[in-house]
Amino acid sequence: MEFNVKKLASDAGVFFSRAMQFTEEKLGQAEKTELDAHFENLLARADCTKNWTEKILRQTEVLLQPNPSARVEEFLYEKLDRKVPSRVTNGELLAQYMTEAANDFGPGTPYGKTLIKVGETQRRLGAAEREFIRSASINFLTPLRNFLEGDWRTISKERRILQNRRLDLDACKARLKKAKAAEAKAACEGDAEHELRLTQTEFDRQAEVTRLLLEGISSTHVNHLRCLHEFVESQTNYYAQCYQFMLDLQKQLGSSKGEIFSGTFVGNAESASPAAATSPPAVAAATLPAVPTIPVVPTIVGVPNTVAEGVLNPNEVKPPASGTRRARVLYDYEAADSTELALLADEMITVYSLPGMDPDWLIGERGNQKGKVPVTYLELLS
């Protein structure tokens, strides 16, 4: 008990001495031991690293999980050292709703078929998102969090110890200065000088420990640089997968759109048959859409029979006397061969159909240039 009381009194005395020294320094009434410029630069660099690492970590967490409640839940599970429950992504949930809607509307209907196709793509997007979040958490967030909760805590602890050692050192210097100014200073000066030497040794030792930890920030930067490259690679793979999924979906929807609107854009075999020609006008008006159509031209002078087989020579194609329309290009399109016409988004071209052509394609003309163009890349105008 006596030892504890003495230790408590000693600790209280040290604390009071440090507080007094710190206050006098702030008031400009006491001298302060300054660290060298290199050490100060290391301290500033460490603080800068800590601050920006925190900001990058927090914003990356927001990027990967925009829901604040979900982030709090994941934080609590992590602190409790429990596995975070698997959570359905928004894409997967949307895919589930689309699939259920398709089953209600009828999976064989055009709308139901399209819902199933889009839903499947949304499911694949959701799975890709889940994998990206997992990879980014392991390869990027975890190293940043480990630095803040591990290395930085150690650095902060050693810096606090160094600060205390410096205050003790400056307090000893002040006591020695007072002892030298006193009249009866023989014994007091010797004690003060001995205490100063011990305090200086402790300060120098702690400064060296802290300096080594601060110099380790360079290694931290190298490690975080490697993690940043892995994060970018994961993000690149994720967006590449999403792009490919959407490109595949666009092609699928383009084929479906060509089937649905084939009567609108290029006509069909029934409208060209004798039975269709002799059908009552009222029936024809009921079966055809109200939008302007591009009729099938029965014969075009100068067009060989190979057009029906999918082979087109643009130089031999002549536009029909009627049935041409203007179209606005929705996306850039690079021609696959000489029979196709390259397109630029937002440009205006003239389009028309040929008998026997694939319903997904039209003939497009821009000045003296002509060639096949995909219907899904166009907005047909009245």
Image (cartoon, helix red, strand yellow):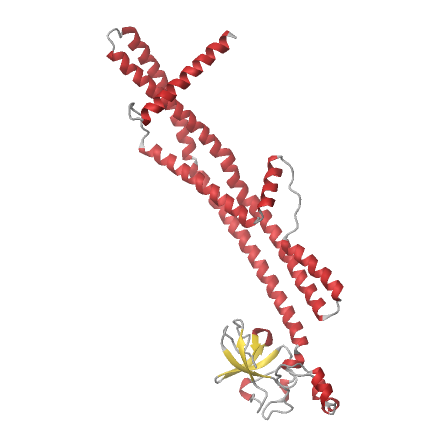
Residue 7 in percent (x, y) is at: 47, 12
* Residue 71 found in image quarter: top right
Task: Give whichever of 358, 12 is nearer the camera.
Answer: 12
Name the residue at 75% across, 69% down. 108
Query: Residue 348, relative to residue 100: is it above or below?
Result: below
Task: Give whichever of 368, 189 is nearer the camera.
Answer: 189
Query: Residue 270, relative to residue 173: is it above or below?
Result: below
Residue 207 in percent (x, y) is at: 38, 26
Look at the image and tell me in which quarter the C terminus lies: bottom right
* Residue extending farthest bottom: 301
Left or right, 233 with reference to 170? right
Residue 318 in percent (x, y) is at: 56, 89
Left or right, 206 with reference to 326? left
Query: Residue 133, relative to residue 196: is it above or below?
Result: below
Name the residue at 60% across, 91% down. 300
Residue 241 in percent (x, y) is at: 59, 58
How many numbered marks have been drawn onto this rendered protein structure?
0
Q: Is there any visible trace of residue 113 in the rendered image?
A: yes
Task: Give whichever of 358, 29 is nearer the camera.
Answer: 29
Name the residue at 62% across, 69% down. 251
Q: Is there any visible trace of residue 203 in the rendered image?
A: no
Query: Residue 181, relative to residue 114: is it above or below?
Result: above
* Residue 298 found in image quarter: bottom right
Left or right, 307 with reference to 15? right
Task: Give whichever of 223, 106 is nearer the camera.
Answer: 106
* Residue 324 found in image quarter: bottom right
Name the residue at 25% across, 10% down. 182
